Image (spheres, rainbow, N blue to C red):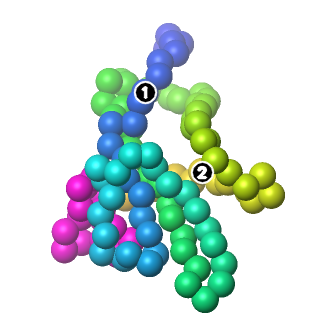
C-alpha cells in the first residue's frame, strides 16, 4: 500500500458544560476547556469531529498529530485529548446530556 500524508480540519465542533447540561454551543467560537473547583465547579469540554471519508476504506493510519492553539491556560494544569467513539453527535444539538435531540 502506498504511503501518503494528508491533513484534516474539524468539520464540526462544540463544547459541553456540566453546569448547563442541556445547553448547546455548536455555534460558539472559540471552543472552551475549563475546570474550576469549589461549590459551583464547572467543567467545559470541547469536542471536534473530522471528516475522514476521503481516506480509502482499507487505509492504515500509522500516526497522527492533533494541533490545537491554546490562547489562555493555567500552566499548572494538565490538558488532555481523548477519542470520542459516539460519531452520531449533531453540532447544533449536542449537550452534556445528549449527543443529539432525544439521544443520550
Residue 87 visible in image: no
Find the magenta span and give its range: 88-103
Q: Residue furthest bottom?
A: 39
- Residue 20, position in %: x, y? 38, 75
- Residue 85, position in %: x, y? 43, 56
Q: Residue furthest right?
A: 76
Residue placed at 56% from the left, 84% from the top?
A: 40
Q: Disc 1 on helix, strand or loop?
A: loop
Residue placed at 50% from the left, 28% from the top?
A: 60
Residue 8 visible in image: yes
Q: Are marks 2 and 1 in contact (CB under 8 Å)?
A: no
> Which of the 4 image quadrants contains residue 92?
bottom left
Q: Nearer the viewer, residue 47 or 73?
A: 73
In magenta segment, residue 97: yes
Classify 10 Å Cα crowding around label 1: few (below 14), some (14-19), many (20 and above). few
Image check: 94 left or right of 68? left
Residue placed at 65% from the left, 84% from the top?
A: 38
In magenta segment, residue 52: no
Query: Which label sits on residue 40?
Result: none
Q: Is residue 52 above or below residue 23?
A: above
Residue placed at 32% from the left, 43% from the top?
A: 12
Q: Disc 2 on helix, strand or loop?
A: loop
- Residue 57, position in %: x, y? 35, 29
Q: Nearer the viewer, residue 61 or 17?
A: 17
Quadrant that contains the C terminus:
bottom left
Q: Nearer the viewer, residue 47 or 103?
A: 47
In the rendered structure, which disc, 2 or 1, sits on the residue that comes first in sequence?
Answer: 1
Name the residue carrying label 2: 81
Name the residue carrying label 1: 8
Label 2 and label 1: CA atoms lie apart by 16 Å
Image check: 39 left or right of 89? right
Q: Is residue 56 above or below residue 103?
A: above
Amino acid at each position: 500500500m502506498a504511503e501518503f500524508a494528508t491533513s484534516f480540519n474539524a468539520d464540526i465542533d462544540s463544547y459541553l458544560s456540566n453546569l448547563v447540561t442541556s445547553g448547546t454551543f455548536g455555534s460558539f467560537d472559540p471552543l472552551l476547556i475549563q475546570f474550576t473547583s469549589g461549590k459551583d465547579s464547572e467543567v467545559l469540554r470541547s469536542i471536534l469531529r473530522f471528516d475522514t471519508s476521503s481516506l480509502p476504506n482499507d487505509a492504515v493510519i500509522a500516526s497522527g498529530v492533533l494541533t490545537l492553539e491554546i490562547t489562555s491556560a493555567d500552566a499548572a494544569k494538565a490538558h488532555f485529548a481523548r477519542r470520542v467513539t459516539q460519531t452520531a453527535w449533531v453540532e447544533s444539538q449536542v449537550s452534556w446530556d445528549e449527543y443529539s435531540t432525544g439521544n443520550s
